[in-house]
Amino acid sequence: MTTMNAAQRRAQAKAEYNAFLAGCPSRQLLDRISDKWAVLILCALGGDSGPGRTGEAGAQADGPKAMRYSELSRLLAGVSQKMLTQTLRSLERDGLLTRTVTPTVPVTVSYELTDLGLSLHLVMRQVRDWAQTHMGVVLAHRENHEARTS
């Protein structure tokens, strides 16, 4: 049996990740990052959550920024406190964002993307922009499908 150093073990593990295989851990990661709340949190912390960010050509994001829990809660219409907390904890555990506690009265907690999270944010922003840009066409297809199958 050959011995491998840490870098060789990481390279071998990386080569073995295949999301099409049932036991591949990358499936859990895909499940996490495909959640709508995770996508929206990544987009918000990436700084492209302002009005008019609908994917138009030339639309510029404000850039990554730290946000407090209350800011995220207000921005993400419809998210429950439980779901926001769970999603933030999961993203932190996976190394996609950091949680910073500032000892003030009351305590201030802020969240910010890590470099890993920022790299994923760029992809998620494109997915979100695609969804917003093509929603009208998708709705038309849904209506046509319902009319044919009813």
Image (cartoon, rainbow, N blue to C red):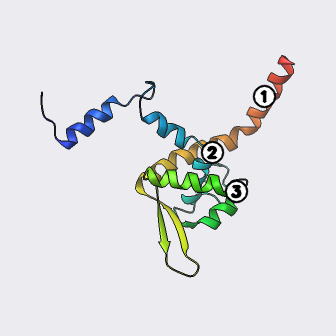
The N terminus is located in which quarter?
A: top left
Q: Is residue 35 visible?
A: yes
Q: How far across and how far down the image is residue 77, in percent?
A: 72, 56
- Residue 104 in the image: above or below residue 134: below
Indicate which label's residue lies in the foreground, 1 or 2. 2
- Residue 15 in the image: above or below residue 113: above
Q: Please name the residue that numbered disc 1 is placed on.
A: 142
Where disc 2 sits, the SS reads: helix
The image's mark for residue 52 is 3
Q: Earlier in the sequence, mark 1 or mark 3?
A: 3
Mark 2 residue type = Lys
The crowd level at tag 2 (other Cα within 10 Å; few <14, some 14-19, many 20+) is few
Indicate which label's residue lies in the foreground, 1 or 3. 1
Q: Please name the residue that numbered disc 2 is placed on.
A: 36
Mark 1 residue type = Arg
Q: Earlier in the sequence, mark 1 or mark 2?
A: 2
Question: Where is residue 19, by image quadrant?
Answer: top left
Indicate which label's residue lies in the foreground, 3 or 2. 2
Circles 1 and 2, Cβ within 8 Å, touching? The answer is no
Q: How far across and how far down the image is residue 46, in percent?
A: 54, 57
The crowd level at tag 3 (other Cα within 10 Å; few <14, some 14-19, many 20+) is few
Mark 3 residue type = Gly
Where disc 3 sits, the SS reads: loop
**Camera-nearest residue between 43 and 60:** 43
Per the model, the C-alpha gap separating discs 1 and 3 is 26 Å
